[in-house]
Amino acid sequence: MADGASRRSNGMADWTREQVEERLIEAADVMKRLPEVRVQGYFSVWPKIVHEFADLVGQEPPRMKRPPPLPDAISRMEVTLPWLRWLEPDDARLVWARAEGTPWKPICWRFGISRATACRRWEYGLSVITWKLNGQKVPAKRSRAFLVDRVRSSSSF
């Protein structure tokens, strides 16, 4: 199920832009929930500090950690991340920033573009991924708007 061809052979519907967006958001969420990478061999010999009630008064409660991702979510993430290679580097960074939930304003500042341009590039990135997953070659002699419109119209039924 890694690409559009295997989806079609299994009798499943073609990929839509919304499905691609959901998978990218899930992949970004899985990346956030993976445990931190630590250097092997380093540890502390200091004893754990036992806090008294008086020490805890006025402190914020510790933040709850989300559980680690399930193995099938990690597998889907590993399939999803290579999709970003189909995009230009700046478009891939923009699409990934949106998948991570970054608001538009910081994205616009980071890339030095307007909100409308950022939105168009994001839609184009999702459209390219959708187009490729459905086993189609991205037309080189057509505009970005053409590709976005074609993907929108094919996923509207």
Image (cartoon, grey):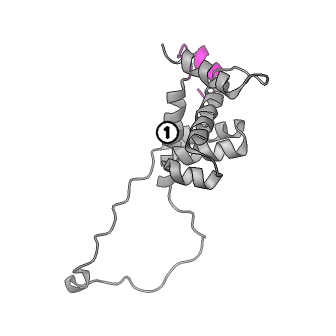
Q: What element carries label 1?
A: helix
> Which quadrant of the figure has residue 128?
top right
> Residue visible at 23% across and 79% down?
58
- Residue span colored magenta: 1-15
From the top left corner, tell me how far across and down residue 55 is, in percent: 25, 85
Tell me if residue 29 comes above or below residue 124 in the rendering. below
Q: In this view, does 83 lie to the left or right of 50?
A: right
Query: Which one is nearer the viewer's eye here, 132 or 95?
Result: 95
Give the main secondary structure of the magenta stretch: loop
Left or right of 118 in this view: 73: left
Q: Looking at this view, is 123 or 128 the one in front?
A: 123
In the foreground, 137 or 151: 151
Farthest residue, direction right? 141
Q: Is residue 50 visible?
A: yes
Residue drawn 55% across the image and 16% down it: 153
Q: In this view, does 134 lie above or below 106?
A: above
Q: Is residue 130 one of those drawn in magenta?
A: no
- Magenta region includes residue 10: yes
> Is residue 31 visible in this depiction of the protein?
no
The amino acid beneath tag 1 is: Asp
Quarter of the image for the N terminus: give it. Answer: top right
Q: Position of residue 57 (x, y in %)?
A: 21, 80
Residue corresponding to mark 1 = 72
Who's the residue at 61% across and 45% down the image?
94
Q: In which quarter of the image is residue 119?
A: top right
Residue 72 to residue 19: above or below = below
Residue 43 locus on image (x, y percent): 52, 78
Asked if 39 appears above or below 22 in the picture, the reply is: below
Within-10-Å neighbours for mark 1: few <14, some 14–19, many 20+:
few
The mark total stands at: 1
- Residue 53 on image: x %, y %: 20, 82
